[in-house]
Amino acid sequence: MEVVIVAGPDQAGELVGGAVAALVSTKPDAVLGLATGSTPLAVYRDLARRHGAGELSLARARAFLLDEYVGLPTGHPQSYRSFIAHELEAHVDFASAAVQGPDVHADDLLAACDAYEAAIRAAGGVDLQLLGIGTDGHIGFNEPGSSLASRTRIKTLTDQTRRDNARFFATLDEVPRHVVTQGVGTILEARHLVLLASGAAKAGAVAAAVEGPVTAMVPGSALQLHPHATVVVDEPAASRLRLAGYYRETWSHKPPWQGL
Ligand code: PGA
C-alpha cells in the first residue's frame, strides 16, 4: 500500500485527477469507480479543470457508482446518482448512459444487485476505484462487520454514518437507513484502489485501515489485501499514522515517472 500525505484538498485532487488522466490517456475506454461524499469533490473539480483545459476526455470512459441510498425518489438531490450528475458529469464529456449506479428503484432489489455486479463484469471490471472512508471505517457503505468477501447488496447504515451524513439533509430523520453498496469483495476486484481522507475526524479510521489488523470490523483495512492500493490523506487525517515519517520519505524519493 502506498500512503501519500498531502497539504490539502487541492493537492489531493491534482494528484488523483492526474492518475485518472494518465489512465484515460493510455486506456480511453477505462472504467472508473466513483465515490460520493465531500472528499472526492476535489478530484472531480480537478477532472473538470483538466477537461476544460482540453487535457482530458472521458467520452469513451465508463463509470460505476460505489453505492446509493435506498428510499429517495429518483432525482432527489442527495441521491448519489444526482450527486455525480451534478458534481462530475455536468463538467466533463461522459457519453450518455456511460455512468451507472445500482437500480435502487427495482421491484426486486436483490436481482438489481446481481445485475449491477454483472454490469461491472461485462464492462471488464473497474480500472480505478475512488474511495472515501467513514469515521467508522466503512468503504462504500460496507459498515463494520461487513464480510471482506461481500458483493453488491443491501446494507443498513449505522447511527454514526447517518449522523455523519445528516449534514446533507434537513433533519437526521430524512437520512435513509438503507443503501445498496458494492461489497468489499467487489471493491477488491478493481485494479487500482485510491482512498482519500481529510480531516482529524478520519484519523482513527485511517490509522485502523492502514496500520491495524485486517478485520471486517474496519472494512477499510481490506485495502491491505489489495496489490495496488493508494491512500491519499491530508495532515490531520494522517495524524495517527505511526509510519507517517516513512510514508513522507518514501513519497519524496519516488521517481517521478512512476505515477500512483
Ligand atoms: P465523506 O464521506 O467524504 O463525506 O467524509 C466518506 C464516506 O463516508 O465514505
Image (cartoon, rainbow, N blue to C red):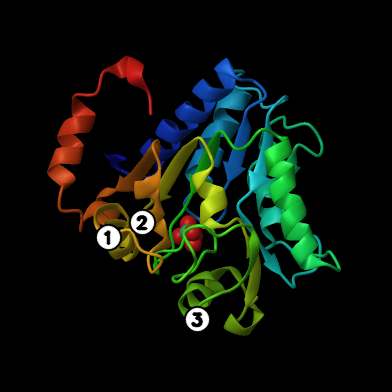
Q: Closer to the camera: disc 3 or disc 1?
A: 1
Q: Which residue is mark 2?
A: 221
Crowd tier of the residue under label 2, counting other residues whose Cα lies within 10 Å: few below 14, some 14–19, many 20 or above: many
The kind of residue tagged 2 is Ser
Q: Is residue 222 above or below residue 257?
A: below
Is residue 111 at all visible to an observer of this figure?
yes
Q: Residue furthest front?
A: 149
Is residue 90 at all visible to an observer of this figure?
no
> Is label 3's Cβ within 8 Å of ligand 1?
no
Q: Which residue is mark 3?
A: 159
Between the C-alphas of marks 1 and 2, the distance is 7 Å
In the structure shown, which secondary structural element does the residue marked by tag 3 occupy? Answer: helix
> Marks 2 and 1: in contact by CB < 8 Å?
yes
The kind of residue tagged 3 is Asp
- Is 82 in front, or is 107? 107
Crowd tier of the residue under label 3, counting other residues whose Cα lies within 10 Å: few below 14, some 14–19, many 20 or above: few
The kind of residue tagged 1 is Pro
| Label 2 vs 3, first from the N-terminus | 3
